[in-house]
Amino acid sequence: MDQPAPPLRHAVLLLALVAAVAGWLYLDRLGTPQSPVWDEAYHLPTTARYHQGTTQYATHPPLGTMLIAAGDSLSERNRNAGWQRIGAERKTAAAAMPADFDYSGPRLAPALFGIVAALLFAVLMLQLTGSAVAAGLLSLLVLADTALLVQFRSAQLDPFQLTFALAAVLAAMRAQRRQDVTGYALFGLFVALAAMVRLNGLMLGAMVPVMLWPLLRGRQWRAAASRCLAGGGAALLAALLVMGAWMNASKLPPAAATPVGQRDLAFDAPSRAEVYRTGTWSLSDMAGAAAGMQRAMAYDLAAIPASDPHGSHPWQWLLGKGMILYNADRTSGTLHSIALVPNQAAWLIALLGVLTSLLPGRLRQSPLRAMLLAGWLGNMALLQWLDAVRVLYSYHYFIPLLLGHAMAALEWKHHGLPRRPALVLAVVVAGFGAIAWPLATYRAAPDWLCAARLAQCGPVQP
């Protein structure tokens, strides 16, 4: 059932407040720390090669890394950086980076997308609950989650994928409610964009059978087929646009004189020699480049180790486990760290949302809940399979996490949670985030906090 919309002024006020809080959280001191954080060690060299127009092949599709490079260009903070030296290796370290490099440049686009993701989550909560107050309190599940905070404040892929994933969920809600072609087209578009950041975004497609169920149950085969074609066509268009942008950004061959260039040459299609010579390309050339990307991703997947001291397993994420210490420094006498610390209270609420969806009658009462649960199960099934293939980290759980939050919002609406228990839960979530906040923002953290939250407190190489 559609939820009654809150008064427009309340919704606008809520979104303005969420934007202000998210802007402060994600943009303040964005250039700190002045060293690579986790996968920034890979994404800074890819940014360098995009700035040089050099062809490259990576572990993931190219949309996220292109957006990181675009944000750095927009900032103009590293216009004269030594990109050739930075881009020569596949992975860089703090000691190899120029002393005057401004890290806020490559972190700008992720932070801006993080703000958009927070806004889309608030819109999702508004639509699910029909209450600006409930949506405001539930928005803390994102704003107070220090695991999301640390990813949104660094040049990582998660802000882009989560923005597109949330947009896809909103489109899926429209498609299920109205059964219109536009909703399915938007869903296909945003799922494809999420997958062009990381391929696991495709698992949002697990929601499609539930979205189509009213048409299938009514044997409206032609209408169901037209919706599938609209979604598939929009997805194909998105993939072509991303690949076209990559082709235009990759006019030069891999630099054979560099270690990373030698690696990338092994995946480069022979047909690209003509692209490099003429500067023009065709759909056939695009297909060859896509095949090279697939070979590179398969090669990297096979090379990823099965375990890592920072890794964790899917069952741990359900309980809010899986902290990762990215960077720690005690040279000043006080701990300054960048650590991915899940907000355990928020992650347990997501688990509660999933468990309540399994209660008798819940799915029959709410096709929307069934759709969200299908998306959650599809994503978790893929992660469970990957867990047997390669090491996983807690940020791989972010899409199921947000789907769990959405199911928790539906449970709130189902029971009409009284204001006092709701405020208590909000205080617990916000309090947990406040306690872990210094660990995620490279601020001075007391020793007791280090001992309570981290498994190790010594220096960690990114």
Image: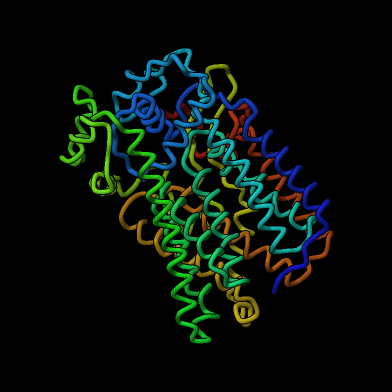
* Rendering quarter of residue 353: bottom right
Residue at x 74%, y 68% (from the top left corner): 3
Closest to the observer, 108 or 178: 178
Q: Residue furthest left?
A: 270
Q: Horizontal placement of 6 versus 181: left or right?
A: right
Identify the image quadrant of residue 152: top right
**Residue at screen point 67% across, 43% down:** 433
Residue drawn where x is 31% and y is 49% of the image: 306
- List x then y, in percent, for residue 50: 37, 29
Q: Residue furthest bottom?
A: 218
Looking at the picture, how far across and down is residue 27, in whole percent?
63, 31
Picture layout, residue 203 above or below residue 436: below
> In the image, residue 176 lies at what x, y percent?
58, 71
Q: Quadrant of the C terminus?
A: top left
- Could you say which quadrant of the image residue 65 lies in? top left
Q: Decide which of 67, 380 is in the foreground and name it.
A: 67
Q: Position of residue 235 (x, y in %)?
A: 43, 57
Looking at the image, residue 7 sits to the left or right of residue 223; the answer is right
What residue sits 44% from the left and 54% below the top? 192
